[in-house]
Image: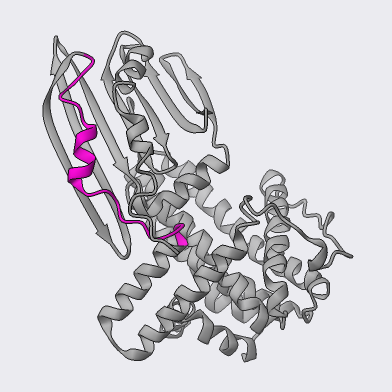
Amino acid sequence: MEFEPLVARVKAILLNPGIEWPVIATESTTVAALYRNYIIVLAAIPAVFGFIKGSVFGVDVPLIGNMRVSIGAGLSGMVLSYALSLVQVYLIALIVDVLAPTFKAQRSQIQALKLAAYAFTAAWVAGLAQIVPWLGTLLVLAGGFYSIYLFYLGLPSVMKCPPDQAVAYTAVCIIVAIVLGAIVAYAVGSITGGGIPGRTTSSDIQFDKNSPIGKLDDWTKKMEQASKEVEAAQQSGDAAAQSAAVGNMLGTALGGKVEALAPDKLKPFVPNSLDSLPRTELSVDRSGAMGMQISEAHATYAGDNRSLRLEITDTGSAKGLVALAGLASVQEDKETASGFSKTYSDDGRMIHEEWDNGGSGEYSVVVGNRFTVKVSGNAHQLADLKAALDEIDLAGLEALKDEGVAQE
């Protein structure tokens, strides 16, 4: 196969979706051609880079160190995830096709497959970011969100869906796709199509405006405007304008444009002493690229043959993803012979605890769905680390949760 057309299509659908979808809609192709020339190549990216991350680079686990999945297990996981990705695209295409009449769209299996395949582009390409420490997870999530937006944007052109039906059409397709995806993941080879609504119209569908799906309408409108800005910048030929527009679009995908706190505003939250230990080291900085900003403060406290590490992070442009994690009620509870790890929500704040019976651990909390505060190091018990974190002015941090958030 030729890679130049594939690369050109990837760039076009990511940077100029409003222009590219009408072109895609009129193209003549087949299921085999779509898989051979596009899907089997891009769907391999998350699987391959997931293998590289897990089996080659490994994952840094606090208190344990770098852990790697064996090459054999990693390869098996890579093949399975790749196969499931190929099946998933076809399943979503079937869903899109079956639901088309419900939302006044035109049924066409090949058009539905084109929509699913090209909408997945952002999520597949974002799979490259798996090898990037910490921020990679956020970028992968951003790719998933952008794929949802691409799906929504492509419906009117590819499936001839009325624009006012696109949000509900997108939401229902995603819900059913998630359900079917869970079934496939649980029992490969047992694929059912039950539960697809056949007589529902978009006017019958109402969502809580504060729910993730209820917010999709508002989010897609913002993404549509950001996409138009990218298209205008592309047509202008101004490289600086193009970079700024893409950055703005990424910021919108992450949940809004946010300027992270300047170092001098974050520094006052780092005390001179912690748990009676004097501060021996301090660094505060703010960094950003492509519309994303993050501020971090790191401090070390040492004495009496023990030490503590304080980390305060303003997630800035990624605060939308942090809020989503809280909204999804992420929870974890693991116990081993050497300690435990636990993630839970308390009074609206996400909390993570880790403890090693050798006398070390970490305690962290998410404040205002934006700031993360973590204390780690040596202690007699986990409660000592929690007590040390309580010395931080969390209320003061939470009061700044809207600082730097762009007004709409």
Q: Residue furthest right?
A: 199
Residue 66 appears in the figure: no
Q: Residue at x 55, y 63 (%)?
A: 219
On screen, 271 above or below 151?
Answer: above
52 or 264: nearer the viewer: 264
320 or 377: nearer the viewer: 320
Q: On the image, which quarter does residue 173 sit in?
A: bottom right
Q: Residue at x 43, y 78 (%)?
A: 15
Taking the image as shown, residue 187 lies to the left or right of residue 80, namely: right
Q: In x, y percent, where is residue 286? A: 22, 50
Q: Residue at x 42, y 16 (%)?
A: 339
342 or 393: nearer the viewer: 393
> Which colour style is shown?
one colour
Q: In x, y percent, where is residue 226? A: 45, 73
Q: Residue at x 41, y 56 (%)?
A: 139
Q: On the image, which quarter does residue 109 sit in?
A: bottom right
Q: In x, y percent, where is residue 380? A: 31, 8
Q: Residue furthest left?
A: 280
Report the magenta residues as a range.
Answer: 253-275
On screen, 339 above or below 192?
Answer: above
- Residue 196: in magenta span: no
Counting the numbered discs, the total is 0
